[in-house]
Amino acid sequence: MILSRYFVCLTVILFVFSQQATARANYQDSLPVTRGAELSLYAEDNETNCLVCHGKLIYTLTDTVMGMTRKQLMSEQNLVIPGMFYNSVHWSFSCLDCHSEEFKIFPHSIEARFETSWGCIDCHGYDPNYEQYGFEEIDAEYQKSVHYTATDGLITCWKCHDPHYYNPLARQTRGGREYIIRSNEMCLRCHSNAEVMGLITDENVEIVLPKHEWLPDVDRHLEAVRCIDCHTRMNDSVLVAHEVMPADSAVRGCTDCHSQNSILMGTLYKYAARESRDEKGFVNGVMLRNDSYVIGANRSKLISFAGLLIIGMTLAFALVHTIFRIVVKPKDQVHE
């Protein structure tokens, strides 16, 4: 009986460690390959056709007829930083894979400037190679969002995810507060800038912070919770929800988040736990390093560590005791 318990304990321990090793291996396999301009097949063409101007904050404009040159300042909206582009998920592409060949001609024609931009679904949709990312479900969610319905599709994927620099946030951050802040920055790029909002609507749209003054300690909320956790409809099959709801449908009740059945357990912490599990394994990522805890409570990590240490020591003592009982037989059995 004691021997069977020993093997059960040993089996559980080996299973846990094997699961962690598998998770770490899978995570390493999913990491992006080495990138950089020196590895791109199109770096020279990109530099010649596009980045000679769009890759520099200050570029030289030349009038070949008059033989005059002048330095110009590239607008922020048309600037592409080469170092960041060649470290993005689209680093290996040519600029002209997505943009019209007419952009080779300068000045650019008005037809080229009004070209239709490709969307994520145009390249990644209905392709078995990208099935795990659920682009089709994300696109279906997005088309029900207020971003799409209120602007007749004017707000595209690229308004939030710049195609020249895009990398999944989980790969760019260490998680936790840094991940939340970076996620909110995507929303605040428009919603905290009245001039940018003017490109989308003629209405006098209020910027974010004044509209959230009803929140107690609004700055801390923006540091601890993603905008989409309150402004999107939850979907169990999509890791990051994309159905942005109208402002009057957003979560406004304290108990919606600060309760045992918190919506954040199904949005923010579901995502964080999955990413942490993929990187660190189930035990480290979910059991030992899960930051969801009780939302709004004052958690002491020292006490949490002490509790885990006590549990670990108890299990270790039980294991040593079991081994000792197997090795050293009781006296009554010796006399028999």
Image (tube, rainbow, N blue to C red):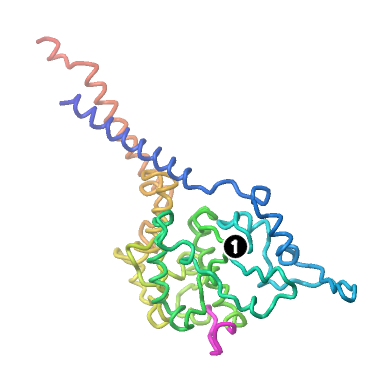
Which portion, as a residue range, is magenta? 198-209
The reply, left or right, for residue 258 in relation to residue 35 is: left
The reply, left or right, for residue 215 in relation to residue 257 is: right
Outermost residue on the top side: it is: 335
Q: Is residue 309 above or below residue 60?
A: above
User: Where does residue 41 sit, x and y in percent of width and height?
Assistant: 64, 51
Report which residue position mark 1 lands on: 97
Q: Amino acid at mark 1?
A: Asp
Label 1 crowd bin: few (<14), some (14–19), many (20+), radius 10 Å: few
Magenta segment includes 200: yes
The reply, left or right, for residue 203 in relation to residue 329 is: right
**Which quadrant of the figure has residue 17?**
top left
Helix, strand or loop at label 1? It is: helix
Residue located at (44% from left, 40% from top)? 25
**Nearest the eye: 204 or 35:** 35
Magenta segment includes 91: no
User: Where does residue 63 sit, x and y in percent of width and height?
Assistant: 85, 74
**Which quadrant of the figure has residue 143?**
bottom left
Q: Is residue 215 above or below residue 268?
A: below
**Nearest the eye: 132 or 289:** 132
User: Where does residue 27 sit, x and y in percent of width and height?
Assistant: 45, 45
Q: Is residue 186 above or below residue 284?
A: below
Residue located at (70% from left, 64% from top)? 50
